[in-house]
Image: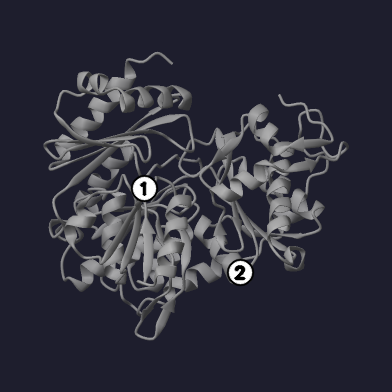
């Protein structure tokens, strides 16, 4: 357990607490995310903003929201305490999706925090930090790490928990962010545009489950809630659980839905199953969403399906490292370049809108953070516009198939070491993977393109101690086989 002095360096806190920066914020085991640690991270974030943003303290408000993990309310209260001690006003935006609280902050020009561990199990949690323009980026992370923050010696007990809980903050929930996020879509899309569609809504423990229900109903769909859970379920849109694959197929057979939809825990990544109960890949729904919205410039990580280029639907495509901060930085550059609308997406399905979209006099404003609702609605409406099923939409795409897998509890340091060995040693690569290798790409991990056009991509997760394996091939079966090939190579390594 970390021993705190009166002043603590965020950089040192990262080293000693077990809570480190991942994508857009801090993440760690719940027992490591003590009130003192969460307070310090929040204070470091706000101190950094006060140094780089003009008139920062005139804004006053800081929005805080969270997902449905048991540890989330405690962490929200600790963050609120830090906000108050900075002379600012914490606003409890409630238990709403990450894009909802980010959109609220963008509209008001104020920073926000989202307490969530996204898709990972609930023995972990995290805090996503957003400034007045959206997610913090890698340069911001570096600036936060340099901060020294004061920890009042009488505020925390021996277990680093707040002595006096801010119960009033947790009780006073402002619904403005939730309502505005729902209206964002209800007011943009045509009235009754989903009329006649039968949609299964897999609710599990997603924080977006009620908001998504309200939006779908308001747009005319017939919606059946499915498997609502009082316990947190770690649904990962990049590594869909076998149980969820079986559920979707059973629902398709028995209920005859046009589709089944869901999101991950914090509502920024979508899940969409077609009328047959087959879950769609995130990088495929990204292409379809961009097609429906009329996007001109696409920014997406190097791991996304190459059907994007093969479709010839988009005038400009930019590939980046994996992670929303890299997508966001490059989207901003493309907005300046002027070929708009500009959007980005990730292989996990999150869609980021960098510039506004205008349709029949209505405007969908930019929301440059991962969002699930825009994907779900766009795919449904593209199928309706094309007068076809969702499965038929996929048949109109170039037939490239992706798959992914992961090794959990696999230390990042070990991943990095063995991936570096494979990257720099051609003999080792050829021994590990018998197919003839055409080229390698080390932009993010190791991406191997074989002479037969198949692709294998290896990298450590940026959010958790996991090894990620991505594959692309001309059939879904071969893509899955390649994922297993990559995983099997690392399964033999002692950890």
Task: Give whichever of discs 1 and 2 has the lower sequence position.
Answer: 2
Q: Quadrant of the N terminus?
A: top right
The picture quadrant where one finds residue 292 is bottom left
Identity of the residue drawn at 24% across and 27% down: 484
Identity of the residue drawn at 39% across and 72% down: 338
Q: Quadrant of the C terminus?
A: top left
The residue lying toward the viewer, choosing from 77 and 248, is 77
Q: Report if residue 197 is visible in the image.
A: no
Left of 441 or right of it: where is 186?
right
**C-alpha distance separating marks 1 and 2:** 28 Å
Q: Residues within 10 Å of mark 2 (few under 14, many from 20)?
A: few
Q: In x, y percent, where is residue 173?
A: 67, 61
Q: Residues within 10 Å of mark 1 (few under 14, many from 20)?
A: many
Identity of the residue drawn at 23% across and 19% down: 427
Vertical placement of residue 250 versus 211, above or below: above
Identity of the residue drawn at 21% across and 34% down: 480
Q: Mark 1 or mark 2: which is in front?
A: 1
- Mark 2, residue position: 176
Left of 246 or right of it: where is 493?
right
- Mark 1, residue position: 348
Disc marking residue 452: none
């Amino acid at each position: 357990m970390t021993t705190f002095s009166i002043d603590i360096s965020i950089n040192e806190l990262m080293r000693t607490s077990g809570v480190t920066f991942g994508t857009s914020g801090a993440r760690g085991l719940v027992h490591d995310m003590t009130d003192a640690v969460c307070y310090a991270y929040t204070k470091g974030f706000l101190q950094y903003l006060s140094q780089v943003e003009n008139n920062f303290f005139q804004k006053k408000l800081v929005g805080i929201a969270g997902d449905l993990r048991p540890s989330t309310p405690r962490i929200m209260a600790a963050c609120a305490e830090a906000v108050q001690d900075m002379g600012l006003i914490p606003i409890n935006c409630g238990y709403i999706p990450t894009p909802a609280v980010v959109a609220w902050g963008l509209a008001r020009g104020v920073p926000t925090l989202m307490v969530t561990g996204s898709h990972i199990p609930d023995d972990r949690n995290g805090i996503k930090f957003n400034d007045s323009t959206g997610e913090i980026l890698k340069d911001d992370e570096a600036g936060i790490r340099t901060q020294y923050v004061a920890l009042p010696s009488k505020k925390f007990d021996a277990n680093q928990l707040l002595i006096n809980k801010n119960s009033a903050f947790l009780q006073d929930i402002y619904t403005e962010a939730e309502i505005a996020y729902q209206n964002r879509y209800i007011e943009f899309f045509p009235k009754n545009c989903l009329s006649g569609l039968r949609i299964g809504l897999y609710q599990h423990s997603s924080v977006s489950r009620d908001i998504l229900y309200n939006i779908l109903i308001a747009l005319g769909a017939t919606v059946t809630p499915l498997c609502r859970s009082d316990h947190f379920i770690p649904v990962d849109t990049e590594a869909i659980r076998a149980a969820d694959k079986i559920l979707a197929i059973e629902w398709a057979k028995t209920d005859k839905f046009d589709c089944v939809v869901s999101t991950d825990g914090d509502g920024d990544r979508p899940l969409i199953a077609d009328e047959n109960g087959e879950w769609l890949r995130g990088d495929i729904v990204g292409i379809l969403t961009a097609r429906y919205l009329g996007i001109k410039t696409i920014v997406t990580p190097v791991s996304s399906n190459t059907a994007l280029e093969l479709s010839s639907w988009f005038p400009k495509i930019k590939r980046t490292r994996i992670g929303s901060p890299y997508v966001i930085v490059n989207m901003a550059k493309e907005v300046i370049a002027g070929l708009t609308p500009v959007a980005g997406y990730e292989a996990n399905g999150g869609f980021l809108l960098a510039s506004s979209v205008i349709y029949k006099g209505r405007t969908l404003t930019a929301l440059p953070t991962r969002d699930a609702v825009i994907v779900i609605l766009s795919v449904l409406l593209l199928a309706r516009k094309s007068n076809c099923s969702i499965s038929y939409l996929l048949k109109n795409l170039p037939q490239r198939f992706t798959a992914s897998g992961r090794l959990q509890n696999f230390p990042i340091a070990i991943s990095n070491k063995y991936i570096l060995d494979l990257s720099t040693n051609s003999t080792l690569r050829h021994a590990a993977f018998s197919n003839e290798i055409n080229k390698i790409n080390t932009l993010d991990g190791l991406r191997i393109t074989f002479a037969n056009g198949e692709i294998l991509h290896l990298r450590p997760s940026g959010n958790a101690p996991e090894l990620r394996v991505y594959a692309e091939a001309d059939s879904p079966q071969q893509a899955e086989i390649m994922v297993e090939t990559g995983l099997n190579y690392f399964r033999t390594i002692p950890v």
